[in-house]
Image (spheres, rainbow, N blue to C red):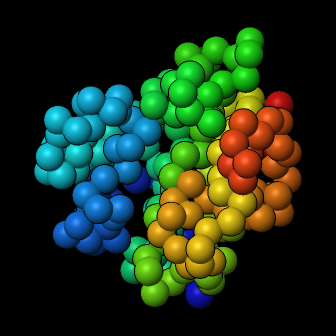
């Protein structure tokens, strides 16, 4: 495996589109779940969500990173300032900020989603993407990076692990700061 990791830009949009496939990754989500309020998400079609991510790929700050294996797209991670994923900050989510943390702080980042090509799950791609995501966040001013992964899924290669696996974040040096729901800790890595 020869992985290269790149920020998703308009130039790499065709690769992300190929990775997500005609269904748009998780049932047409196009990695919009945390970017939209529930009512906004319900009102949008799969094509609208695709357009939203496509627009984000044209922004100055990429919405995430793509993993290519010898040029073939095999994985994605959404890594952004918390302000870019408003649903992740809702008081009703297990990922809500700690008391005193401001989700608008440009130094507070979130690693909110992964998507690994189905035939490539379980091969360590999420580990490589996570390492690159932390570096990307730090290079763009992050002081803290957080995630709210899942401790267990029905299967280790399950798509329900779109939030990542606790084991992967543990191995990368993230620490649990609070666990509001059993099996879904808010984990943090201090970068500065």
Residue 112, given in percent of the width and then of the height, sits at 55, 46
Task: Between residue 182 and residue 69, name the one nearer to us.
Answer: 182
- The quarter in which the C terminus is drawn is top right
As drawn, the residue found furthest toward the front would be: 182
User: In the visual, does 19 lie left or right of 119?
Assistant: left
Q: Is residue 160 above or below residue 86?
A: below
- The image shows residue 179 at horizontal and vertical percentages of 77, 40
Total marks placed: 0
Nearer-the-camera pick, 183 or 103: 183
Q: Nearer the viewer, residue 115 or 11?
A: 115
Residue 122 percent location from the top left of the image: 61, 82
Residue name at image x 27 percent, y 29 percent: 39
Residue 92 as seen in the image, left or right of residue 137:
left
State the quadrant of the N terminus: bottom right
Task: Find residue 83 and report its horizontal and vertical position in percent.
Answer: 50, 24
Residue 32 visible, this angle: yes
Comparing 18 with 33, the one in front is 33
The image quadrant of residue 74 is bottom left
- Please name the residue shown 32% across and 39% down the image: 56
Q: Quadrant of residue 177?
A: top right
Q: Would you say residue 141 is visible in this rendering? A: no
Residue 173 is left or right of residue 137, and the answer is right
Q: Residue at x 14, y 46 (%)?
A: 45
């Amino acid at each position: 495996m020869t992985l290269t990791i790149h920020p998703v830009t308009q130039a790499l949009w065709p690769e992300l589109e190929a990775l997500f496939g005609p269904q748009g990754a998780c049932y047409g989500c196009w990695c919009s779940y945390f970017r939209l309020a529930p009512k906004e998400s319900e009102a949008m079609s799969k094509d609208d969500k695709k357009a939203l991510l496509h627009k984000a790929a044209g922004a100055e700050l990429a919405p995430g990173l793509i993993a290519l294996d010898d040029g073939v797209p095999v994985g994605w991670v959404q890594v952004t300032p918390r302000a870019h994923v408003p649903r992740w900050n809702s008081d009703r989510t297990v990922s809500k900020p700690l008391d005193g943390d401001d989700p608008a702080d440009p130094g507070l980042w979130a690693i909110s989603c992964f998507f690994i090509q189905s035939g490539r799950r379980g091969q360590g791609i999420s580990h490589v993407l996570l390492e690159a995501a932390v570096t990307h966040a730090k290079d763009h001013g992050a002081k803290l990076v957080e995630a709210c992964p899942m401790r267990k899924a029905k299967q280790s290669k399950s798509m329900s692990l779109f939030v990542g696996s606790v084991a992967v974040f543990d191995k990368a040096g993230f620490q649990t700061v609070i666990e509001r729901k059993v099996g879904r800790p808010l984990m943090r890595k201090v970068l500065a």
